[in-house]
Image: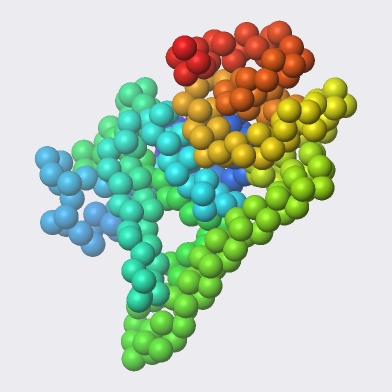
């Protein structure tokens, strides 16, 4: 592996991690750089597929982003598309009557400085100035690893064993159902905490972010007044994360700040606004000025 390429991959990883942590998503990011041996093998095995003026290899740098919850996949894709220019995507539609793996792969353009400093891209004209990102949930991640190494790369081992191949796909279907079930479980848990006025727990289970800290007492006192607790429970999580991902907001992701931000964006309770620290209000004004005009 070329030192320059390893450094580029590390820089991309740092940028992606920083942005996901800024939004607060529960996630894991993995990456690899295609080795010289792997690159040579891919070019040798597909001599007519890749050319200097035609289709090029686009996954010299490969990233895998795994999300804890399936509804975060779209948020993660929006975050990456705001950081890098999206070139292409391959997203398979799941069929109701077939158990099979589905791809969710995106191709992004490398930053100019990275492509100019990659020794592999400079020396090999059949390699594109791009990187690939695969999006998965944590529950499906292990299955895909097993399938890739022990079926995709070993197709002969599975010939005349279609029943077991279908059973392996059925395990993936079970994991997809578990993904859905996990989200529904936390929705129910959040609702129970809301009904019991357990506001700290409601915020944690509703927003499912990498939160820290506990609610200040002065905020808790307001939750039963003017149905503030109900308003917070009804905040659309996707809308909140979309607003944050589109902005450049850099604030500590804790329960208090989530309440202040939801109030600023959605229900604008004057008492909560008065409790919001002035530096935080200034930060909100700078980042959400357009959406509050």
Query: How many numbered discs?
Result: 0
Residue at left offset 33%, top offset 31%: 85
Q: Is residue 132 above or below residue 278?
A: below
Q: How has the structure been colored for display? A: rainbow
Name the side, left or right, on which 220 lies relative to 158: right
Viewer-closest of 274 and 203: 274
Q: Nearer the viewer, residue 212 or 147?
A: 212
Q: Residue at x 73, y 28 (%)?
A: 226
Q: Left or right of 53: which side holds 30?
A: right
| Direction right: furthest residue | 217
Query: In this orientation, does residue 187 appear?
Result: yes
Horizontal arrangement in the rendering, residue 17 relative to residue 152 (left or right): right
Where does residue 251 sit, x and y in percent of width and height? 65, 21
Q: Looking at the picture, does residue 159 appear above or below residue 222?
A: below
**Quadrant including the N terminus:** top left
Residue at 36%, 50% (x, y): give it.
105
Residue shown at the point (32%, 59%) measured from the top left = 92
Q: In which quadrant of the rendered view does residue 94 lie?
A: bottom left
Q: Position of residue 240 (x, y in %)?
A: 55, 32
Q: Nearer the viewer, residue 5 or 193?
A: 193
> Taking 127 as reference, is 109 above or below it?
above
Give whichever of 147, 202 is nearer the camera.
202
Residue 213 pos. (x, y %): 81, 32
- Residue 293 is situated, as x and y percent measured from the top left of the image, at 47, 12
* Quarter where residue 256 is shown: top right
């Amino acid at each position: 592996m070329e030192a320059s390429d390893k450094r580029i991959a590390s820089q991309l990883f740092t940028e992606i991690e920083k942005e996901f942590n800024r939004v607060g998503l529960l996630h894991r990011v993995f990456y690899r750089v295609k080795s010289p041996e792997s690159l040579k093998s891919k070019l040798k095995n597909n001599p007519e597929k890749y050319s200097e003026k035609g289709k090029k290899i686009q996954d010299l740098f490969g990233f895998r982003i795994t999300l804890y919850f399936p509804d975060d996949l779209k948020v993660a894709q929006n975050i990456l598309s705001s950081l890098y220019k999206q070139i292409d995507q391959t997203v398979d539609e799941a069929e109701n009557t077939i158990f099979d793996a589905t791809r969710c792969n995106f191709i992004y353009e490398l930053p100019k400085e990275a492509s100019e400093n990659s020794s592999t891209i400079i020396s090999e004209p059949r390699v594109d100035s791009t990187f690939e990102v695969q999006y998965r949930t944590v529950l499906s991640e292990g299955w895909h690893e097993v399938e890739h190494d022990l079926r995709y790369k070993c197709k002969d081992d599975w010939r005349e064993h279609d029943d077991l191949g279908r059973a392996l796909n059925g395990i993936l279907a079970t994991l997809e159902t578990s993904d859905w079930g996990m989200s529904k479980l936390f929705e129910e848990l959040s609702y129970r905490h809301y009904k019991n006025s357990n506001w700290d727990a409601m915020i944690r289970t509703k927003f499912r972010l990498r939160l820290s800290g506990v609610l200040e007492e002065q905020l808790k006192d307001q939750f039963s007044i003017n149905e503030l607790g109900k308003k917070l429970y009804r905040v659309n999580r996707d809308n909140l994360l979309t607003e944050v991902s589109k902005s450049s907001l850099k604030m500590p992701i804790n329960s208090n700040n989530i309440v202040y931000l939801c109030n600023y964006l959605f229900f604008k309770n004057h008492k909560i606004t008065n409790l919001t620290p002035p530096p935080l209000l200034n930060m909100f004004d700078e980042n959400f000025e357009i959406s509050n005009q």
